[in-house]
Amino acid sequence: MSAQPAPDVTAAGALRVAGLRKRFDTSEGPLTVLDGVSLQLARGESLALTGESGSGKSTLLHICAGLEPADGGTVEVDGRAMTGTDDAGRAALRRGGVGLVFQQFNLIPSLTVAANLSFQARLAGRHDPAFAADLAARLGIDGLMTRYPEQLSGGQQQRVAVGRCLAARPALVLADEPTGNLDEATGDAVLDLLLETTAAAGAALLLVTHSPRLAARCKARAHLRAGRLDERP
């Protein structure tokens, strides 16, 4: 994996970003957060993205997921264009090929843990009750399946969010601080599951984290600074 443009790696490429640009208008004038960012991530690979708060890490993930438009450049997921596609096209690609773990969990309040866990997989047409049950056990939420999000702690909600993402078996997993609300031991276990499950499924993992210790566990690292990526060994 390289945080710079790399040679063509075959159709197994899960994520290709080229020349991505994004800026926001502020009271002090335009603020550039992404300035020609390029990266490639193949299936089975993991990349940890670090950077200071406000450096644009979450913005990069949101653009890769089709949740936010770019001002320039391209994003392809599993060989299909995410940028330059209409809302319906981006939603279809996201539903079938992208798994998201948000900082804010984004669980559906009216659904039980079991229903939240299966929600994305059902949309993608890949619901597997046995696989979902195994994920729930490994995440330590199998005893919470009849509860609702409001009845869970922040750490429990985070684990449900991770399980919901993985249950759909996406080609690309985008995880924004997925262990931020967990204690160190539970966070390590969740990262283990993310790394093992994505690798076993032949998926790619793009992980945003502030933790150098967790970042070091991914196959590659990159640091976002002044709108550009620096490779980290």
Image (spheres, helix red, strand yellow):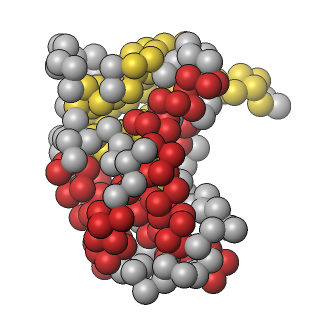
Q: Residue at x 29, y 63 (%)?
A: 131
Quadrant including the C terminus: top left
Q: Looking at the picture, how far across and down is residue 200, in whole percent?
A: 17, 51
Specify whether 25 is left or right of 9. Answer: right
Residue 103, above or below 5: below
Q: Residue at x 25, y 50 (%)?
A: 198
Name the residue nearer the viewer: 193 or 51: 193
Specify whether 39 is left or right of 37. Answer: left
Specify whether 215 is left or right of 209. Answer: left
Residue 1, above or below 125: above
Q: Looking at the picture, how far across and down is residue 52, in whole percent?
A: 49, 47
Say whether residue 9 is visible: yes
Residue 50, above or below 187: above
Say whether residue 175 is visible: no
Count of marks overlaid on the render: 0
Residue 219, above or below 79: below
Q: Looking at the picture, how far across and down is residue 2, in whole percent?
A: 23, 28
Residue extending farthest bottom: 143
